[in-house]
Image: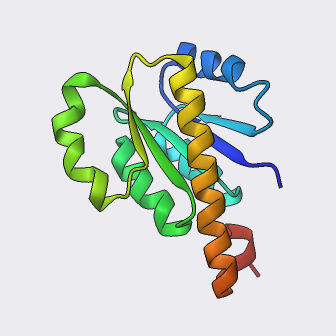
Amino acid sequence: MTESVLFVDDETLILDYLRILFAGEGVRILFANNGAQALEIAGRERISVLVADYRLPVMNGMDLVRLVRERSTDTVPIIMSGYSEFPALRDHVHRERIFRIIPKPWKGVEMVTAVREAIAESRELRGRKGAEGISEHPKACAG
């Protein structure tokens, strides 16, 4: 199964760079400009990794993570953030089970490595759920 990674940022240049960066990674990449778009995508797609900016229009990245994880506990969240936001984010890391916080500006290799590791974590979480006979895919609950 091809893994899907959802990148959420309101800066078009960042999303364009991510599109180029992940073009050869063998993953399905999806993009949203705000939290509402991201929730709509997460409602219809299985998302292995959610990479969201902390500061987003409509809702912040932590609220988005919480809402996506309510639907899919095997979606692994990564937050991108400016250095000035780090103290506020530390409280959320354990509560929201954030896999990694990546400081902006980030290096391409840093982002690719974090996403690869998050994909492995998502697969492990799905494997554990599969062994327990649990399904949380949005489409599996329909009908």
Q: Position of residue 75 (x, y in %)?
A: 56, 57
Instruction: Name the side, left or right, on which 23 lies relative to 78.
Output: right
Q: Quadrant of residue 27?
A: top right
Q: Count up the numbered dots.
A: 0
Foreground residue among 74 and 43: 74
Considering every residue shown, the one lying at the far right of the view is 1
Above or below, 51 against 138 in this view is: above
Above or below, 135 against 99 in this view is: below
Above or below, 36 against 82 in this view is: below
Foreground residue among 67 and 133: 133
Q: Residue at x 63, y 48 (%)?
A: 119
Q: Quick one: quadrant of the N terminus?
A: bottom right
Q: Residue at x 67, y 20 (%)?
A: 21
Considering every residue shown, the one lying at the far bottom of the view is 133
Q: Residue at x 63, y 34 (%)?
A: 31
Q: Residue at x 29, y 58 (%)?
A: 94
Q: Position of residue 23 (x, y in %)?
A: 77, 24
Residue 43 in sight in this render: no
Q: Quadrant of residue 19?
A: top right
Residue 95 in sight in this render: yes
Q: Quick one: quadrant of the C terminus?
A: bottom right
Q: Position of residue 95 (x, y in %)?
A: 28, 61
Foreground residue among 106 and 13: 106
Q: Position of residue 32 (x, y in %)?
A: 58, 35
